[in-house]
Image: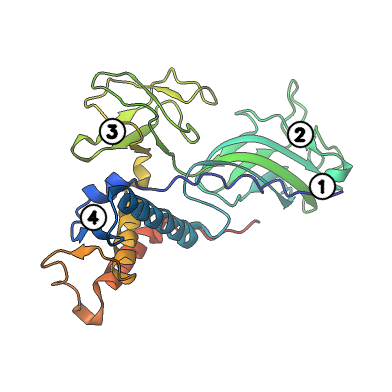
């Protein structure tokens, strides 16, 4: 019998942080002519080469910020580990991903999963979510005022300081998706490829060049429902299909991703034509243009770096 880790299928949001059009519309990439990335080929081959660089740049963002097991994109993750109950009867969980947006389930056991996991029904009374951690209060007893000083209503033999096998499912990260269909000005809903990390009242930016706009998800939206987002107000502009729709927090991540794309174009010696004057600022302090783009990207990403540890 094989034992499969519960988290192996979680890191499955591979959507890059920018689209081909995002790069072409950006002033950061204005120094490059992307019509000659691959010599003597057509537009489709050029766009395919650019998309490959976008995926590589997005992976570089995730590797720098979140390590090899996580992404900044919103995902639903299942994790397990050994955790202790404190004197107040609380599990304080520091999961791998951040920010914590939602906790879907939590269970624990003294003898590991083989001994049977005890699920704790999660409510606003016993679960508190913070940006980098969440707290589950095992002393809360549904339907009564009973308080267990050391044991709990679900696990009467529990005691603080001991380690317990825990498993939990949670949502983390920043919404990063695309619209499925073309949109018209005045539309009041958007069908997206994924609604993970999106909640009633969430602000989202539709990245579409001069038609970029911010929308707010209506309060009528039901979390875990269809990927059709009702909007608090109608769209101001029309948009083609597969435009980036993302949380405002990812704005600097998008900028960093484009810096990485430009740097890789310049480093790989591609046929991308460098427009006149683009290298005038390069060479300051001995840095090449590609090195300056890398430095700018890492500066933008420093605030997103996540150092993980469980207490």
Label pair 1/3, CB-CB below 8 angstroms: no
Q: What is the spatial separation of the Cα atoms under label 1 and label 3, in whole angstroms?
A: 49 Å
- Name the disc covering residue 159, or none: 1
Which residue occupies 84% across, 46% down?
110
Residue 111, placed above or below residue 281: above
The foreground one among 95 and 145 is 95
Please tell me whether mark 1 or mark 4 is closer to you in this view: 4
Please tell me whether mark 1 or mark 3 is closer to you in this view: 3
- Name the disc covering residue 119, or none: 2
How many residues crowd around disc 3 within 10 Å: few (fewer than 14), some, or many (20 or more)? some
- Name the disc covering residue 35, or none: 4
Q: What is the spatial separation of the Cα atoms under label 4 and label 3, in whole angstroms?
A: 31 Å
The foreground one among 189 and 16 is 16
Q: Is residue 252 visible?
A: no
The part of the image, by quadrant, that contains residue 39 is bottom left
Q: Provide residue 131's location: percent of width, then percent of height.
A: 50, 45
Q: Is residue 79 left or right of residue 158?
A: left
Taking the view exactly as shown, the residue that stands out farthest to the front is: 40
Q: Provide residue 308's location: percent of width, then percent of height.
A: 57, 58
Residue 169, placed above or below residue 7: above
Please tell me whether mark 4 or mark 3 is closer to you in this view: 4
The foreground one among 306 and 296 is 296
Tell me which numbered mark, 2 or 1, is placed earlier along the sequence.
2
Q: Secondary structure at mark 4?
A: helix
Which residue occupies 74% across, 48% down?
85
Tell me which numbered mark, 1 or 3, is placed earlier along the sequence.
1
Q: Provide residue 59's location: percent of width, then percent of height.
A: 46, 57
Q: Which residue is mark 3?
A: 214
How many residues crowd around disc 1 within 10 Å: few (fewer than 14), some, or many (20 or more)? some
């Amino acid at each position: 019998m094989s034992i499969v880790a519960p988290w192996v299928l979680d890191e499955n949001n591979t959507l890059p942080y920018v689209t081909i059009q995002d790069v072409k519309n950006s002033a950061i990439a204005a120094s490059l002519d992307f019509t000659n990335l691959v010599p003597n080929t057509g537009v489709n081959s050029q766009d395919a080469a650019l998309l490959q660089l976008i995926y590589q740049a997005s992976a570089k963002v995730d590797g720098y910020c979140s390590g090899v097991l996580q992404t900044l994109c919103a995902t639903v993750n299942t994790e397990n580990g050994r955790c202790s109950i404190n004197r107040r009867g609380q599990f304080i969980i520091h999961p791998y991903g951040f920010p914590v947006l939602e906790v879907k389930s939590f269970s624990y056991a003294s003898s590991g999963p083989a001994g049977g996991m005890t699920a704790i029904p999660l409510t606003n009374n016993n679960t508190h979510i913070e940006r980098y951690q969440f707290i589950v209060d095992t002393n809360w007893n549904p339907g009564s005022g009973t308080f267990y000083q050391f044991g709990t209503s679900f696990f009467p033999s529990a005691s603080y300081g001991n380690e317990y096998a825990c498993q939990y499912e949670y949502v983390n990260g920043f919404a990063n998706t695309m619209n499925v269909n073309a949109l018209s000005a005045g539309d009041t809903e958007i069908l997206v490829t994924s609604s993970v990390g999106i909640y009633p009242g969430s602000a989202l930016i539709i990245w579409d060049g001069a038609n970029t706009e911010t929308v707010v998800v209506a309060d009528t939206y039901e979390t875990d429902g269809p990927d059709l987002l009702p909007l608090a107000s109608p769209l101001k502009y029309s948009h083609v299909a597969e435009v980036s729709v993302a949380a405002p927090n990812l704005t600097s991540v998008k900028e960093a991703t484009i810096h990485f794309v430009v740097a890789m174009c310049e480093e790989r010696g591609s046929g991308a034509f460098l427009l006149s004057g683009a290298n005038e600022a390069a060479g300051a302090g001995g840095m090449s243009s590609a090195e300056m783009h890398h430095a700018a990207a890492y500066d933008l990403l420093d605030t997103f770096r996540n150092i993980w540890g469980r207490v």
